[in-house]
Image (cartoon, helix red, strand yellow):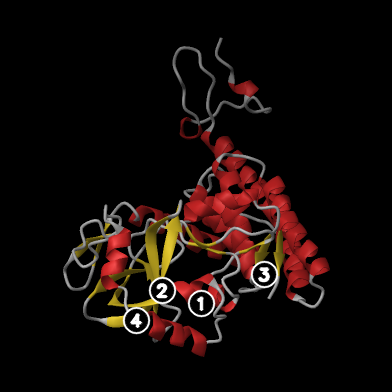
């Protein structure tokens, strides 16, 4: 028997046609406005929970690192945001297309926005942070969309986001013999080692012993599944780069190239490598090959984003700084939990227990 209007509203006033939709065959009346209100409340509750868990994370960091006052400030601001949540209709119009607790883009946007509170941004209340969350959600979704679409460059050439059809990067994601390619273009290890020696890299570390020079060119691109933003194509002409081999299962799978004139420009040739370095305990994680070399090649440099969840098995992880620790926490623990609809609070607590910061 269909539910009457009195089951939906206590005043027993019939709903207008604009606010109800009848479903045949005796199914209940669905009131759209009530459903949307409930979803908005769910979103507010979700954000409040994330503010609280992130504040707890920051409080733990403040106790662990009392000399860094940013953690206590961030925790205070996060709790203020939690108590000041008010999603206006205008804000909900922009947030509602993104809100999905099972969506990786939404979870990543919330994590990034909360992680920057007190460090990279000082929100002027929940309204301002809500706008930042919308912007980050738009950017995350745009990045996800672009991994499956072509990018139109100013020169009129349409290039695939992963260079599958870009003739200037012939080895990226191609079935090539990386060992033979490395041998054909590697030369002058003495000059590569002189460059590293000038930058105080230990001569006893593995990176110093394996470094060579190569000529080639770097290409900036959108590499959604990697931790770097450049590809390197070896040629017999072009700029010089310091090159390090990357091994997987005792075979050469890829190699990292570092621009000799700017060590912040670095990337790989084939994209097949997972990480650079050896697994140790505790495990030190690095952001760049320059940092890995500066620390005597201790620890690993993740190259593939798929490598991060494997680090859940590491009993202790060392990050470079607080921002790096938060990024590792998200990639290793929080994001995998969000993807499988697991307990994100437990994931954050596990990250807090496993990750520490050392300079």
| Residue at image coords 57%, 49% | 310
Name the N-terminal-most of marks 4 and 1. Answer: 4
Which element carries disc 2, helix, strand or loop?
strand
Give the quadrant of the C terminus: bottom right
Q: CA distance from mark 4 to mark 3?
A: 38 Å
Q: Nearer the viewer, mark 4 or mark 1?
A: 4
Q: Which residue is mark 2?
A: 266
**Mark drawn on residue 322:** 3
Position of residue 33 measured from the top left corner of the image (x, y, whole percent): 55, 38
| Residue at image coords 25%, 81% | 238
| Residue at image coords 25%, 56% | 164
Q: Is residue 314 visible?
A: yes
Which element carries disc 4, helix, strand or loop?
loop
Q: Nearer the viewer, mark 3 or mark 2?
A: 2
Position of residue 29 measured from the top left corner of the image (x, y, whole percent): 53, 23
Q: Which residue is mark 4?
A: 188
Q: Which residue is mark 1?
A: 290
The residue positioned farthest toward the top in the image shown: 1
Q: Nearest the camera: 64 or 233?
A: 233
Name the N-terminal-most of marks 1 and 2. Answer: 2
**In the picture provided, is 305 more to the left or to the right than 83?**
left
Q: Marks 3 and 1: CB-CB under 8 Å?
A: no
Q: CA distance from mark 3 to mark 1?
A: 19 Å
Name the N-terminal-most of marks 2 and 4. Answer: 4
Q: CA distance from mark 2 to mark 4?
A: 19 Å
Which element carries disc 3, helix, strand or loop?
helix
Q: Marks 1 and 2: CB-CB under 8 Å?
A: yes
For label 4, count other residues whose C-alpha is less than 10 Å away and answer few (under 14), some (14-19) or many (20+).
few
Position of residue 5 measured from the top left corner of the image (x, y, whole percent): 59, 22
Q: Nearest the camera: 205 or 301?
A: 205
Q: CA distance from mark 4 to mark 1?
A: 20 Å
**In the picture provided, is 288 more to the left or to the right than 186?**
right
């Amino acid at each position: 028997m269909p539910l009457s209007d009195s089951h939906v509203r206590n005043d027993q006033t019939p709903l207008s046609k604009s606010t109800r939709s009848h479903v045949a065959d005796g199914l209940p009346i669905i009131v759209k406005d009530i459903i949307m209100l409930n979803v908005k409340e769910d979103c507010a509750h979700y954000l409040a929970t994330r503010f609280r868990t992130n504040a707890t994370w920051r409080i733990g960091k403040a106790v662990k690192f009392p000399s860094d006052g940013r953690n206590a400030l961030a925790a205070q601001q996060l709790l203020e945001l939690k108590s000041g949540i008010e999603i206006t209709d205008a804000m909900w119009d922009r947030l509602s297309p993104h809100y999905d607790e099972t969506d990786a883009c939404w979870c990543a946007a919330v994590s990034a926005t909360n992680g920057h509170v007190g460090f990279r941004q000082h929100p002027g209340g929940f309204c301002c942070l809500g706008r930042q969350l919308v912007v980050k959600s738009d950017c995350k979704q745009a990045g996800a969309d672009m991994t499956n679409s072509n990018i139109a460059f100013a020169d009129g050439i349409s290039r695939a986001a992963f260079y599958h059809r870009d003739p200037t990067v012939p080895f990226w994601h191609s079935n090539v013999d990386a060992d033979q390619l490395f041998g054909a273009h590697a030369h002058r290890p003495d000059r590569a080692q002189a460059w590293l020696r000038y930058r105080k890299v230990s001569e006893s570390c593995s990176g110093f012993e394996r470094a060579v020079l190569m000529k080639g060119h770097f290409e900036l691109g959108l590499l959604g599944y990697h931790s770097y933003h450049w590809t390197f194509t070896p040629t017999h002409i072009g700029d010089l780069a310091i090159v390090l081999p990357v091994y997987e299962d005792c075979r050469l799978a890829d190699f990292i190239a570092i621009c000799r004139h700017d060590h912040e420009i670095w990337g790989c040739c084939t994209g097949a490598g997972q990480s650079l370095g050896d697994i140790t305990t505790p495990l030190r994680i690095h952001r760049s090959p320059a940092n890995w070399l500066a620390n005597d090649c201790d620890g690993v440099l993740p190259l593939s984003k798929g490598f991060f969840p494997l680090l859940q098995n590491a009993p202790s992880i060392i990050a470079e700084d607080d921002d790096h620790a938060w990024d590792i926490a998200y990639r290793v623990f929080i994001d995998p939990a969000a993807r499988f609809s697991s307990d994100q609070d437990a994931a954050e607590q596990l990250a807090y227990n496993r990750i520490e910061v050392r300079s």
